Amino acid sequence: MTVEHFDVLIVGAGLSGIGAGYHLQQNCPGRSYVILEGREAIGGTWDLFRYPGIRSDSDMYTLGYSFKPWTEAKAIADGPAILNYVRETARENGIDRHIRFNHMVKDASWSSEDARWTVEAEQGPGKDRVRYTCNFLFMCSGYYDYDKGYTPEFSGMDRFQGSIVHPQKWPEDLDYAGKRVIVIGSGATAVTLVPEMAKDASHVTMLQRSPTYVVSRPAEDDLANMLRRNLPAKLAYGVTRWKNVLLGMAFFRYCRAKPEKAKQMILSGVREQLGSEFVKKHFTPTYNPWDQRLCLVPNGDLFDSIKGGNASVVTDHIETFTEKGILLKSGEELEADVIVTATGLNLKVLGGLDLTVDGRHVDFPQTMSYKGMMYSDVPNFASAFGYTNASWTLKCDLTCEYVCRLINHMDDKGMKQATPRLRDGSVEEEPWLDFASGYVQRSVDKFPKQGSKKPWKLYQNYALDIMAMKFGKVDDGVMEFAKPPAKAQREPERLAS
């Protein structure tokens, strides 16, 4: 088996992986890298999901890369526009030439003696095994299972005579025009699907077990558009980006400090649209704002669909599916031709990667996350993971910059291995995410832990992370640096760049 060697191996060619390629080219220009992508296209989430109306639930001035201005009018962009933005970034910077498609990474083993990873992947439909070695392994594969979404085992599903679909696997030939649709769920996917499908369906019912906080926001940022007309693109983008970052942080802190006032502020906006009784029953959650992620509806499109009679909301529990639709605990039966189970995702730790260090299997729930990106006792290994309370890319950009700082620091000091070590006995274990959302709670025990204090604590705070990851010391007393034995000091021939 031919083995190719790269300085850095990136897993995933989505939003994070393309960003990682850019940062490596800019900050570590002498380093070779490859991106292994399990699917056949660039884009990750934005290429996989094809359901009607798919869009971001973050503004593109913060979901976009720090280095590439978002120049379109819509701040809340649709999926195809985001996919084009990611692919354009890859093409403009030559990152696409470093991607190996249809390479599903399965396992990786680290050798301290050689100071390198050996990575194995399955290639193509035949799942032929291919092998690579690298000095640094960077996981940019997201956090959920690409194979299937989460659908509870509802009673009687096999009895339903219509179509049942999950948004993660949307059929291209699904025809719902003029038909009755039930969308099960109340999260970001559901509030996106309902107004979009209501344009063509005879009626769409959003069936929720419990309400979610829903916030209306203009699809376009008027200030951003004005700045872009009058300032250089990068300057206008930078100003808007920081404006949105600071507003987002301020609102999150307000929700945490004064949850009841924040709750009433959010609900008052919905009351203006739908009335007090409707909001009390269908849009008033039992939890505080930001215990779960808020749902964003651009220009109030969900509310318009409900007011126009094209959509409705039912808050109840499912008793069973029937031949004609869904029977509720209340005894009411909702009839439908199409049922969409917008019931969430299955999380997957680092894409299901099987990892060993010097022959020892890495059990990720037993590790602790360092700065939200590396893991205790795992050398030369990082993962890109975004925020729960802000745009994904904000944290991923910082992670990419830190990985480059770490690689350059090792070069400067003649070191080959960097490993976070937990030596402080006063650090207590905490759950990886303190988040009440169902998709997190279903899987949180499979993920690494976080610690009770830095650098093991996940603060979910962009300003604090800038200080720690952009300006903080790389050699902080927690990161342990080492050289392999002399016989491994020779670099293997670089077969690609």
Image (tube, rainbow, N blue to C red):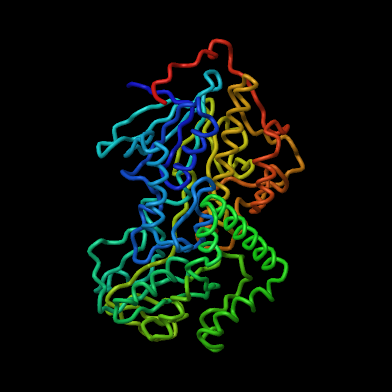
Tell me: 392 left or right of 158: right
Q: Position of residue 358 (x, y in %)?
A: 53, 25
Q: Quadrant of residue 113?
A: top right
| Residue at x-position 60% and y-position 55% | 239
Q: Nearer the viewer, residue 345 or 58?
A: 58
Please, is residue 265 above or below residue 424 in the view? below
- Counting labels gives 0
| Residue at x-position 36% and y-position 84% | 333
Q: Nearer the viewer, residue 191 or 432?
A: 191
Q: Position of residue 65 (x, y in %)?
A: 51, 48
For this orientation, the residue located farthest to the right is: 426
Q: Position of residue 169 (x, y in %)?
A: 32, 58
Task: Name the image quarter holding the C terminus.
Answer: top left
Residue 267 visible, this angle: yes
Q: Quadrant of residue 313?
A: bottom left
Q: Nearer the viewer, residue 227 or 263?
A: 227
Please, is residue 465 above or below residue 288 in the view? above
